Amino acid sequence: MDRFRGFIAGIGTTSGTRLVVGHWLESPFGAFTDVMAENAAGSRLLLAPSPEIAEYVGGTYHFDAVDVGDVEARLTANHLLVSAGPLRLNVDLGARTVLGRMLERIPPVVAVHPRWLGAINPLAGLLVPGVRTAGSAGGERREYYGVRSIRSLTGAQASWDGRDLGSLSAIDPPVRFGFSSVPPKPQIVAVTTSIIP
């Protein structure tokens, strides 16, 4: 089982571009950040920091194109800053959500266990439309999302090749990289992702 422990930020913009930033503190590849972007026309792009990560992530999710290059990120108490290929992103972090505070009460060992995540998967979609905690990933793998905390996002400045992507907005329509979208409301989650071959 491959485990990725870190953060996932889901960001919508008024231009229609939607971004999913994975900021991983621990993984089979060490610490790294990757970005999944879907533009208003529905084209899906992966920005990955190495060919190995591009191959793994590209084999797990669905993209129309993959770019390998420098991906740099910094997460502070109040901001997430990302520089990745054509993308420049500065996101403002808000308060923990009610659901996030509830999730923090679940023992960490339980919160990330595949059996638990499979059991609560039907409930997750009812609480947060479009979200699943367990499903089938690419390459005949099973994937589980164990969210341990949630913070709202209150603002974002984003540009693509120097073009302003507009202000923060809902992730609508949902992104189509894998079996689950991020929540419609922009937020950042502390998460452990488990992938079983």
Image (spheres, rainbow, N blue to C red):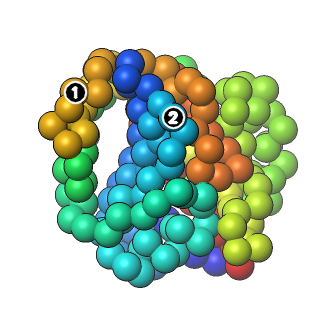
Residue 28 higher or lower than 133, as above or below: below
Q: Residue furthest left?
A: 162
173 vs 20, nearest the viewer: 173
Q: Position of residue 193 (x, y in %)?
A: 57, 59
Q: As shown in the figure, which amino acid type bears the numbered disc 1?
A: Asp
Of 153 and 59, nearer the camera is 59
Which amino acid type is shown beneath numbered disc 2?
A: Ala
The percent coordinates of residue 34 (x first, y second) are 37, 58
Check disc 2: other Cα within 10 Å, few if <14, some if 14-19, many if 20+.
few
Circle 1: element type: strand
Nearest to the observer: residue 104 or residue 57 = 57
Q: Is residue 40 left or right of residue 183?
A: left
**Residue behind mark 2:** 41
In screen coordinates, is 149 left or right of 87?
right
How dense is the environment of label 1, judged by Cα within 10 Å: few (below 14), some, or many (20 and up)?
Answer: some
Pick the quarter of the image with the C terminus. bottom right
Residue corresponding to mark 1: 164
Q: Nearer the viewer, residue 130 or 167?
A: 167
Sooner in the amino-acid sequence: mark 2 or mark 1: 2
Residue visible at 71% across and 50% down in the picture: 179
